[in-house]
Image (cartoon, grey):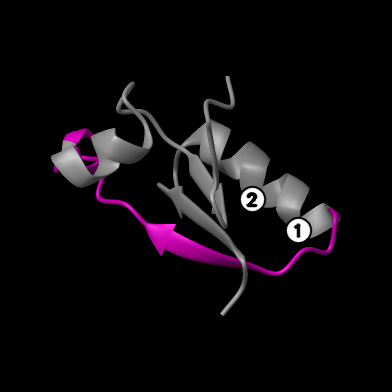
Amino acid sequence: MAGIVLYNYELDENCYKVRLALSMLGLEWEPIAVNAFPGNEQTTPPFLAMNPLGTLPILKDGDLTLFGAE
């Protein structure tokens, strides 16, 4: 399993930017598909604990959590 985990929605442009950057850098990463529409899974308590804004993408690398690719 890769150290980098990306929680993303496939059709989201900001998620695409992060996926593209990770791929261009040649980094190993694990994609986690999030049911953004219509489920709004990113606004559930487990996701809000990672990102209080309830937005995607969310990138985790060990203890580091990054969000917001606008």
In the rendered view, tell whether residue 28 sits above or below residue 61: below
- Residue 30 falls left or right of residue 29: left
**How far apart in space, not on screen, are marks 1 and 2 (Cα)?**
6 Å
Q: Quadrant of the N terminus?
A: bottom right
**Furthest residue in direction right, as rendered:** 25
Q: Are marks 1 and 2 in contact (CB under 8 Å)?
A: yes
x, y percent for residue 4: 61, 60
Picture quadrant of residue 53 = top left
x, y percent for residue 42: 26, 39
Going 31% across and 25% down the picture, which residue do you hit?
52
Q: Residue 23 carries which label?
A: 1
Q: Name the residue under label 2.
A: 19
Q: Give the range drawn in magenta.
A: 25-43
Q: Quadrant of the C terminus?
A: top right
Q: What residue type is labelled 1?
A: Ser
Going 52% across and 54% down the picture, which residue do you hit?
6
Q: Which mark is residue 33?
A: none
Please tell me whether mark 1 sits on a helix, a strand or a loop: helix
